[in-house]
């Protein structure tokens, strides 16, 4: 059975076991080389749909005596983590507990930053997977840059809670991969809320989801329209960005004319007759081009669903042609073939540990892909899910990738592999200055594990977001976070915590 949003269909993806998984995708991207041209953004109106996120009340907490993986590539044995006012205050050994602090004795346990998934469809393809919940692909045109995933996020998706039980504190929710340009993604903190705005990560840049290869050409070609080939795909991207360049110039011209008009008004104050001069009229606003101009101006990070090495190389050239930056290639099954090129262009590879072979463009995969993407100097490997099930076990996916890298002799430590789940993911989302590592001043997003987090037996026992305890495996809440689970809580939620 085809993986639904991977094929560009309108239904939610269906997950099936391991190598037979027919997945879809999206894309994430850090930086392509060419600097974006400096220009006035399209209409300079205040950003709508702003974050209303407010951190939950938190208590000063000292986690003591754990094996601490800081996310910076450092390991501290018998380490302590102090959280004050919702932020990391100190990380080290033999830290003193401030007066009134809650002290958690964590001997024999491990502590990490909260895990970050750069590629999720929770909320836009929520559970249960019915047609009424299928909101990830606006399959009406190959370019739907005007669509925003956040406008379809359902905060009551039970998947948010099960992801939290897997240590996920932050995620990027993306449109599907059916279109050449599917629209904007949104980064959220994994907290229960009534509205998505109350989950929206404050200050995080939006993402732009693009897709290479089989999905767009297969869907639209099947309807007898462009694109029906890979050359049609590239022509579609180029025309969309060329149109956006022209749109940006219209607004730049308007800005220049308006500045001249205002200067003239000021210089001739009191000397001219009414009606002598009229202000210029602004261009008609185009939401599709607004998004693409935002990407070219470096305000929106580009994430690209792309499997084949040759197509990734073409997309890097496309980024240079139009001056946008690629934050990450998602899925990137053949990233190992061009790991040096990705590193040279500061592009992350957001990848699975061992999913490939479910369609032709995903055929040439190796289980060492993540480790090889990480190997060059400045390499940026990220473990992602693209799955409501996989997001619950992202730590195990990283463990598999680490093991395969070590088997081929790369000597990857646990403290280094943790960066694939935290620091590198935060870099790809443009939020690494505030989260992704256990460093003083960063958000108190912390996970306490019952043991080695790369083990298949590892369980997240306590999860903190901004210093607030939001998940406690030993003391599950008496009612579900999602109203949707009322009446099914015993089996659906408590059962998942066993």
Image: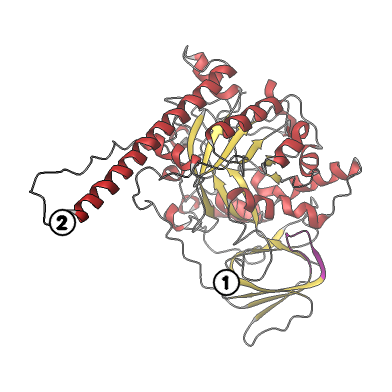
Is 10 contained in the magenta span?
no
Left or right of 461 on screen, residue 183: left
Which residue is nearer to you in this view: 136 or 304? 304
Q: Nearer the viewer, residue 132 or 368?
A: 368
Q: Nearer the viewer, mark 1 or mark 2?
A: 2
Q: Secondary structure at mark 2?
A: loop
Instruction: Say if 212 sits above or below 483 in the image.
Output: above
Residue 69 inside the magenta-drawn segment: yes
- The residue that disc 2 covers is 269
Q: Earlier in the sequence, mark 1 or mark 2?
A: 1
> From what the image shows, is residue 144 above or below residue 95?
above
Which residue bears the numbered disc 1? 86
Query: Which quarter of the picture shows residue 177?
Result: top right
On the question of residue 57 being in view, the answer is yes
On the image, the x and y values in percent for residue 481 come to 51, 58
Magenta part of the chain: 67-77
Residue 399: % across, % down = 79, 48
| Quadrant where the C terminus is found in the figure | bottom right
Q: Is residue 189 left or right of residue 154?
A: right
The quarter of the picture where the N terminus appears is top right
Residue 107 appearing in the image: no
Check disc 2: other Cα within 10 Å, few if <14, some if 14-19, many if 20+. few
| Label 1, label 2: how far apart the Cα atoms are | 54 Å
Q: Position of residue 339 (x, y in %)?
A: 76, 37
| Residue farthest to the top, as pictured | 224
For residue 2, side relative to residue 279 (left or right): right
Q: Is residue 201 above or below residue 348?
A: below
Element class at badge 1: loop
């Amino acid at each position: 059975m085809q993986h639904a949003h991977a094929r560009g269909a309108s239904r939610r993806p269906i997950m099936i076991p391991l190598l037979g998984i027919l997945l879809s995708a999206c894309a994430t991207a850090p930086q392509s080389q060419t600097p974006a041209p400096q220009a006035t953004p399209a209409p300079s109106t205040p950003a709508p749909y702003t974050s209303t996120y407010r951190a939950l009340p938190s208590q000063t907490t000292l986690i003591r005596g754990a094996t601490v993986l800081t996310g910076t590539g450092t390991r501290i044995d018998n380490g302590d983590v102090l959280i004050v006012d919702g932020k990391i205050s100190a990380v080290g050994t033999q830290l003193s507990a401030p007066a009134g602090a809650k002290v958690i004795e964590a001997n024999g346990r491990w502590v990490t930053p909260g895990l970050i998934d750069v590629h999720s469809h929770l909320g836009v393809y929520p559970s249960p997977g019915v047609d009424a919940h299928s909101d990830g692909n606006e399959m009406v045109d190959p370019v739907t840059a005007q669509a925003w995933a956040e406008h379809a996020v359902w905060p009551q998706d039970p998947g948010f809670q099960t992801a939290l039980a897997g240590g996920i504190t932050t995620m990027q929710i993306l449109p599907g991969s059916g279109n050449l340009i599917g629209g904007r993604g949104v980064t959220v903190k994994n907290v229960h809320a009534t509205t998505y705005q109350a989950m929206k990560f404050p200050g995080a840049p939006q993402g732009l989801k693009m897709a290479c290869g089989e999905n767009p050409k297969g869907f639209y070609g099947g309807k007898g329209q462009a694109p029906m080939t890979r050359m049609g795909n590239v022509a579609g991207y180029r025309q969309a960005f060329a149109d956006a360049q022209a749109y940006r110039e219209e607004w730049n011209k308007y800005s220049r004319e308006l500045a001249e008009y205002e200067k003239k008004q000021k210089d001739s104050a009191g000397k001219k007759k009414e009606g002598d001069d009229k202000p210029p009229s602004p261009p008609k606003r185009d939401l599709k081009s607004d998004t693409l101009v935002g990407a070219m101006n470096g305000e929106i990070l580009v994430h690209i669903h792309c499997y084949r090495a040759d197509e990734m190389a073409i997309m890097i050239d496309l980024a240079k042609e139009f001056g946008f930056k690629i934050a990450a290639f998602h899925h990137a099954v053949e990233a190992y073939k061009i790991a040096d090129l990705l590193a040279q262009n500061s592009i992350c590879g957001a990848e699975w540990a061992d999913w490939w072979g479910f369609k032709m463009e995903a055929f040439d995969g190796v289980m060492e892909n993540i480790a090889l993407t990480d190997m060059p100097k400045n390499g940026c490997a990220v473990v992602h899910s693209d799955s409501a099930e996989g997001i619950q076990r992202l730590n195990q996916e990283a463990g598999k990738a680490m093991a395969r890298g070590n088997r081929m002799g790369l000597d990857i430590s646990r403290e280094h592999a943790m960066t694939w789940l935290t620091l590198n993911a935060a870099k790809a989302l443009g939020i690494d200055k505030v989260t992704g590592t256990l460093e003083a001043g960063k958000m108190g997003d912390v996970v306490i594990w019952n043991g080695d987090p790369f083990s298949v037996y590892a369980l997240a026992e306590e999860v903190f977001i901004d210093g607030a305890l939001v998940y406690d495996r030993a003391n599950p809440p008496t009612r579900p976070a999602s109203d949707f689970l009322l009446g099914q809580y015993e089996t659906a939620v408590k059962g998942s915590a066993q």
